[in-house]
Image (tube, grey):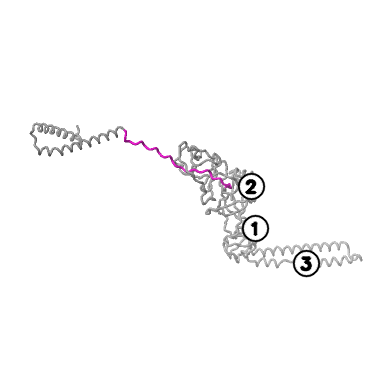
Amino acid sequence: MFDTPFDRYHDEAAAERREQEQFDEREQDGGYDPAEVTARQPKSRLMRVWIGVLIVLAAITAWWVLGGGAPAPAAAPLPVVTVATPLQKEITEWDEFVGRFEASRRVEVRPQVSGQITAIHFTDGQFVRQGAPLFTIDARTYRASLAQAQVAQATTALALSRDNLARAQRLVEDDAVAANEIDRLKAEVRNNEAGLAAARALVSARALDVGFTTVRAPISGRISDRRVDAGNLVSGSGGSQATLLTTINAVDPVHFEFTGSEALFLKAQREGLDKGTPVEIRLQDEIEYTWHGKLDFTDNGLDDESGTIRARALVDNPDGFLTPGLFGQMRLATGGTHKAMLVPDTAITTDQTRKLVLVVQKDGKVAARSVELGPQIGNLRVIESGLKPTEKVVIKGVQMAMPGQQVSAQQGTIAPAHAETRMAKSPPAKFRAAAATFAE
């Protein structure tokens, strides 16, 4: 049907057999040619070789088709995972707050007398000491008023009235002076004493005005820029109506003000955290918590609208680096120091709302454990509950392991990364500590 090499070969073999039969008949009759016999012998041997090859090929084909040559597929190797028991270390839990630095004292510098500014004695932004002169106001008017005080006249009048009273009292024994004259002289003495006291008070008041013509720094701190220049008239009418000259912020120490939720406030109250509790603060461009202070103030009530309470810490700032208005992140040790289990954060998987870690059991099968997470420390996560200290947690190859699957487990270790003191946020659950570090 099909013109294949095998078909052509069979046809040629049949023709060759017919020719051989005819040759054999002629040979029996004695009518063969010797040259033809010689040529016929190699051709017969070649045919026999081809027939043998065909038989061998047919046998091999039959053996293969009947299933003797197809090797059975090899069994798939077990997934290889790395396991380790949870790391157990002492940790300190912290709660974190965001706040900003404020000056421990802030003063608006205003004049107490009116007049013309004649001199300015500071450079904008410099640090000034308490009592240092800042502005000078023209004092000539106030010195002239001081000179007008009549203290000398009041002193002379008082001395004269006292002498008159003394002479009159000596004449009383001789009945030379009436009693009412004595009374008049005594009243005159008292009147002159009051006049002298008023004159002296006037001198003190006008002396103060002269002193107020030099405006001095009321506190030590960093001064702002001047709001008026020399030559301007300023008003010293008192209160907020007086001209604002500049402001001074006390920056050593500084305050760090923050707010906390009602839950954190209750937690701190139950743990006895009060004034003097240490805090640590870091700035926005810092990794480590390099600034240290102490709780200084907690407000006497929660805000009705936000449900938060205002608090404050006092931070030393000897070099004046911390500037009012800077934002910072503060942590407060509220959880104490305790021993905790930690696993790599990469070993934790999520199943809808549950957090899981995979463990390898004694029979080599994988099982899932639902765990409750705590804060993160570097590359490790605190496990609050749901895991035993002796269980072998899958720390590498998590993506190749499934619950109920047989695996090949290799032993590994859990170690904190180099930046183990760095902190990260914890999941918002039940107002636990927001972060933790290893206890020193």
Q: Toward the viewer: 329 or 193? A: 329
**Residue at the spot 78% in from the left edge and 62% down from the top edge:** 194
- Amino acid residing under circle 1: Gly
- Within-10-Å neighbours for mark 2: few <14, some 14–19, many 20+: some
Instruction: Report if the CB atoms under discs 2 and 1 are less than 8 Å apart.
Output: no
Q: Left of 303 or right of it: where is 201?
A: right
Q: Secondary structure at mark 3?
A: helix
Q: CA distance from mark 3 to mark 2?
A: 65 Å
Residue tagged by mark 2?
A: 273
Is 11 rendered above or below residue 417? above
In which quadrant of the rendered view does residue 188 lie? bottom right
Q: Secondary structure at mark 1?
A: loop
Give the magenta part as a residue range.
67-95
Q: Toward the viewer: 251 or 159? A: 251
- Amino acid residing under circle 3: Thr
Q: CA distance from mark 2 to mark 1?
A: 43 Å
Q: Toward the viewer: 346 or 358? A: 358
Residue tagged by mark 1?
A: 238
Dot 3 or dot 2: first in sequence order is 3
In front of the other: label 3 or label 2?
Answer: 2
Dot 2 or dot 1: first in sequence order is 1
| Residue 94 seen | no
Q: Secondary structure at mark 2?
A: loop
Name the spot of residue 86 as percent of width and height, x first. 53, 43
In which quadrant of the rendered view does residue 189 lie? bottom right
Question: In the rendered structure, does residue 399 fall within the stretch colored magenta?
Answer: no
Q: CA distance from mark 1 to mark 3?
A: 33 Å
Residue tagged by mark 3?
A: 155
